[in-house]
Amino acid sequence: MTEGQDPDLPLEIIAKNSAVAVPSRWRFRARYFLVLLVPVLMFSGAVIGMYFQPPALQKFYALTGLQPGAGSASPIALPPEIILPKDMAETMRTSDVVGLARLMPRGDISYVAPPYGAGDARVAEILVTESDVVKQGAMVARLDNQGQLESAILLAEANLAVRQATVVQTRAVIENSRNEALASLAQAQSVAAEATANLSRTNDLSAHGVTTQSALDAAIAAERQATAAVEKAEATLARYASAKVEDQPDVIVASRNLEAAQAELARARNDLIRSAVVAPISGTVLNIHARPGQRPPTEGLMEIGDTSQMMAEVEIYQDRISIVEIGQPVELVAAALNRTLQGRVATIGLTVGRQGLLSDDTAANTDARVIRVMVELDEASSVIAARFTNLEVIARIDTDIHVLAKP
């Protein structure tokens, strides 16, 4: 016990240097700060790992069989609005271009409309069924205005027969009139010759004082009348003798009326096609929108497409189109198919437009700017896709094929 120490205290009091010792409250606060720093470091590591995907992280996913974003309904690591199927995601590369697409026949779908001028006609009969293969120009439906149009043809044929008879009658009248004119001229010439001879005899008798002056005057008048009759007969004959029968005005008018009747019959026969609905292209009947007794709908009676060669219309975001080239291989997949489809880029659109194929996500961007790329499916894929026209699929374009081939 030191000097001045209180004997009642059990322990020795040791003086502490306040300039060196650290209070316990500061040690507590440092531990608390470290606890808060751990989540920040973990979040930063997750973001860096997702962005750079270092080899160690890739090996981890390869060993465990996990897929980035597989546990989320909307993985953010994929292109916007597109959720890749598992099979496609397993082979997905960062250089691939992905877009929504739809399957379509070559040349797209053709909507069969009623013929022009059908008016209020209704559907009388549908001559094909879905999945039937038709040729271009083949009748696929009949309208109920066929009877009315056939009656118009019968009326035009009757009118044509009348006009034909009129032409024959006019020609016969012209021929008869010309023959009558010839006979009248011959008769007038005979009368004129007799009158001339009678006048000559009367003049001789008058010179010898045998006949009277009144008889001479009568002979002169008869001769003049006979001469006038000859001139009239010649003028009448000149109407028919100056031109052929076909060039006679009456025959020309009758012939023009005949031509008008022929044109009317041709028009009536052409109008008959307004009762027939024909296929505009060769292809397969995909859908029928009308039934007998209905008025043809605005979207057409049916849809026809050339499914012998199927295509896919892919919408590619404008910022990825620069690496897409014609001939690059394309993989197409959808939940409705049991296998993937294969094809190649056939054409690349020349305009940028608004996105037309939208996902089921109500929060999806509906104003994206895209370029349409047409993909031609191979023969085996076309056979499968022929049953799924307008099916929405996901297309993946392998851009490495041409990128690596460039020098």
Image (cartoon, grey):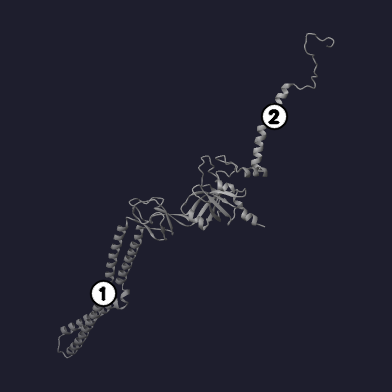
Q: How far from the left and from the top, in percent, is residue 389?
A: 47, 52
Judged from the image, the secondary structure of the residue bearing numbered disc 1 is helix
Q: CA distance from mark 1 to mark 2?
A: 125 Å
What residue do we see at 67% from left, 29% from top?
35
Q: Earlier in the sequence, mark 1 or mark 2?
A: 2
Q: Residue furthest bottom?
A: 208
Q: Quadrant of the N terminus?
A: top right
Q: How far from the left and from the top, in percent, is residue 350?
A: 56, 54
User: Of the residues shown, which amino acid type is indicated by label 1?
Assistant: Ala
What residue do we see at 28% from left, 74% from top?
171
Against 341, is 60 above or below? above
- Badge 1 is on which residue? 172
Q: Badge 1: how crowded within 10 Å, few (<14), some, or many (20+)? A: some
Against 209, is 179 above or below? above
In the foreground, 253 or 397: 397
- Badge 2 is on which residue? 34
User: Of the residues shown, which amino acid type is indicated by label 2?
Assistant: Leu
Judged from the image, the secondary structure of the residue bearing numbered disc 2 is helix
335 with respect to 32 (left or right):
left
Against 225, is 124 above or below? above
